[in-house]
Image (cartoon, helix red, strand yellow):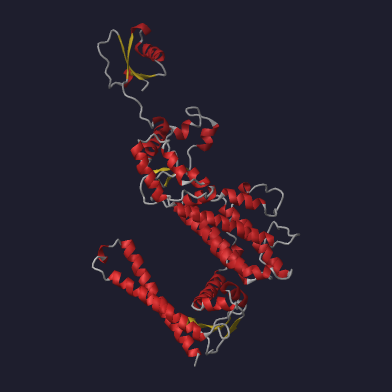
């Protein structure tokens, strides 16, 4: 510490508790000059004793919030940027660094250095273990981004200066965790995965398979973009402003509402720093709302004639993609920039997605009533899939798409095309009443029933025999599972494994029930 206890040669001792006997200086020479002035003697008559203590490692870091702005000078940067808004750090250095910055700022600047502190997560391996060279579970982000073989991982161990014995143990750990090495995932997938894991106060147990999943999400996004832009007319021009038109279908209006819901959710999670929830909102929108529903149901429109309906859908498609990419950009900067550059421009001023404005919710897009309606339609679609799923083998063999009749008290007119497209079936009829004997039925609720017309598509006798064989096999599987559950050692089974087994049992019971019902329906068709 550059602090010196001073006394003149005439004094016997200096009281170290008297602050008048201390000077702070950059050098011993400077300290002597200051001491001579204080004591009123010549420099030669001064004796110095430097404080034997040292400043702790974090001392200069504690000055960081204002020292980098030119302090102690009253600079323009200091006036403009201090105090700050947010500090992001790990919770393991709260008292080492954060507390010191607060104390230093209060003492020297008379104010807090920042308003909020965000604690990021600590990355551990998939089993929750701290990453260690000797365990061989260290994951280098570059290896995840670029990919690496198991041999490459093993070779890296010998760069850590570990004893040979520990290298062998670590190599075994790598073989167990990464038997095929690490797949190339890319920067965006790595970034998105870390954000998806992030919940305040919790560590990240990094599973590489999850990063691979987000790489697949990038591929899905790329293919969806490619399909969408292929369907733009050659003379398509993006409008600077977009408004919902009368020619926009309910499906168009629904995807705009879902886009608005996603934007609102992401903004909310941004404000509370819940990045994991923000990534989930974005992921669900792109994968389920946009790809699985809107694009699939719109394929027939884009393959159809060039009319007002198609042009209206085209404008919606462009705006959903362009706005959606801007929402995703902070989470996946590289793929969003690449795709955005391939889109037609709204104007010549926008040269990069990085400098465009971040999307705000658009009030006119809100349509919660329509959202509830589409949710119900999707319940019907899942019912049709479930109903036909039991007979899927026979339907596939026939190479025919079964027709379907929906008997409902609700007003669902106009949704026939969406239901047909997403359920993968033929013609759909929506009627108010009727009973269709000879066709398998699925009850959605008290107001809606579904009939799948399979006559001429499947051989009911063969199908009944196939279902009987399948039911017999599943009943055998259920019996084996029950023997395992009734075993005296089952109580000692880990809770997670026990839960999985019990869930599998319940799933088998429900599936056997459905197959039994389908088998009886096939037998009834024969009479």
- Total number of numbered discs in the rendering: 0
Image coordinates for residue 402, horizontal then vertical, percent:
58, 80
At 44% across and 53% down in the image, what residue appears? 197
The front one of 431 and 108 is: 431
Q: Is residue 111 left or right of residue 237?
A: left
From this view, report whether residue 469 is shown above or below residue 199: below
Residue 222 quadrant: bottom right
Q: Residue furthest bottom?
A: 527
Which quadrant would residue 43 be assigned to in this image?
A: top left
- Left or right placement of residue 427 versus residue 28 in this view: right
Quick check: 382 above or below 518? above
Taking the image as drawn, is residue 87 in sight?
Answer: no
> On the rendered structure, is 352 left or right of 236?
left
Nearer-the-camera pick, 488 or 124: 488
The answer to whether residue 1 of the structure is visible from this angle is yes
Where's the N terminus, which quadrant?
A: top left
Depicted 100 relative to depicted 237: above or below: above
* Viewer-closest of 406 and 353: 406
Residue sitting at the far right: 235
Extreme residue in the left direction = 488
Give how far across and how far down residue 54 sits, in percent.
34, 25
Above or below, 292 relative to 431? above
Q: Horizontal and vertical percent for residue 385? A: 52, 75
Please name the residue shown 62% across and 75% down the image: 417
Whole-percent x and y of residue 367?
57, 68
Q: Residue at coordinates 28% horizontally, 62% vertically from top-left? A: 493
> Which of the 4 image quadrants contains residue 131?
top left
């Amino acid at each position: 510490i550059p602090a010196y206890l001073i006394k003149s040669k005439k004094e016997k001792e200096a009281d170290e508790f008297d602050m008048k006997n201390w000077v702070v200086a950059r050098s011993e020479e400077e300290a002597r000059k200051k001491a001579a002035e204080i004591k009123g003697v010549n420099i030669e008559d001064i004796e110095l004793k430097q404080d034997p203590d040292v400043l702790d490692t974090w001392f200069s870091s504690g000055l960081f919030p204002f020292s980098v702005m030119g302090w102690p000078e009253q600079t323009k940067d200091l006036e403009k940027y201090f105090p700050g808004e947010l500090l992001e750090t790990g919770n393991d250095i709260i008292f080492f660094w954060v507390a010191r910055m607060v104390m230093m700022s209060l003492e020297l600047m008379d104010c807090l250095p920042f308003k909020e502190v965000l604690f990021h997560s600590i990355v551990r391996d998939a089993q929750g273990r701290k990453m260690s060279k000797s365990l061989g579970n260290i994951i280098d982000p570059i290896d995840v981004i670029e990919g690496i073989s198991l041999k490459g991982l093993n070779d890296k161990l010998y760069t850590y200066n570990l004893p040979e014995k520990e290298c062998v143990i670590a190599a075994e750990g790598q073989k167990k965790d990464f038997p095929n090495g690490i797949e190339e995932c890319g920067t965006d997938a790595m970034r998105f995965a870390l954000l998806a894991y992030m919940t305040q106060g919790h560590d990240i147990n990094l599973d590489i398979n999850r990063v691979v999943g987000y790489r697949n999400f990038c591929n899905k996004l790329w293919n969806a973009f490619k399909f969408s832009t292929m369907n733009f007319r050659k003379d398509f021009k993006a409008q600077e402003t977009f408004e919902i038109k009368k020619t926009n279908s309910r499906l168009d209006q629904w995807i705009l509402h879902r886009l608005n819901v996603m934007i609102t959710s992401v903004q909310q999670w941004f404000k509370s720093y819940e990045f994991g929830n923000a990534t989930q909102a974005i992921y669900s929108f792109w994968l389920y709302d946009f790809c699985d529903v809107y694009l699939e149901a719109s394929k027939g429109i884009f393959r159809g004639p060039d009319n007002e309906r198609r042009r209206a859908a085209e404008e919606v498609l462009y705006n959903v993609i362009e706005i959606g990419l801007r929402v995703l950009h902070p989470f996946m900067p590289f793929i969003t920039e690449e795709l955005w550059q391939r889109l037609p421009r709204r104007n010549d001023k926008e040269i990069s997605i990085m400098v465009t404005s971040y999307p705000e919710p658009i009030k006119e897009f809100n349509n919660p009533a329509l959202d509830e309606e589409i949710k119900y339609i999707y319940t019907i679609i899942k019912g049709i899939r479930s109903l036909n799923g039991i007979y899927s083998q026979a339907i596939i063999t026939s190479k025919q798409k079964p027709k379907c009749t929906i008997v409902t008290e609700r007003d669902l007119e106009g949704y026939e095309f969406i239901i047909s497209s997403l359920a993968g079936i033929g013609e759909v009829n929506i009627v108010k009443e009727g009973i269709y004997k000879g066709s398998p039925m699925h009850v959605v609720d008290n107001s809606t029933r579904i009939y799948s017309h399979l006559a001429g598509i499947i051989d009911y006798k063969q199908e009944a025999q196939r279902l009987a064989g399948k039911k017999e096999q599943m009943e055998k599987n259920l019996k084996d599972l029950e023997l395992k559950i009734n075993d005296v050692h089952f109580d000692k089974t880990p809770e997670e494994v026990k839960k999985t087994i019990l869930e599998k049992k319940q799933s088998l019971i429900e599936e056997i029930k459905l197959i039994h019902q389908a088998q009886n329906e096939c037998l009834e068709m024969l009479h």
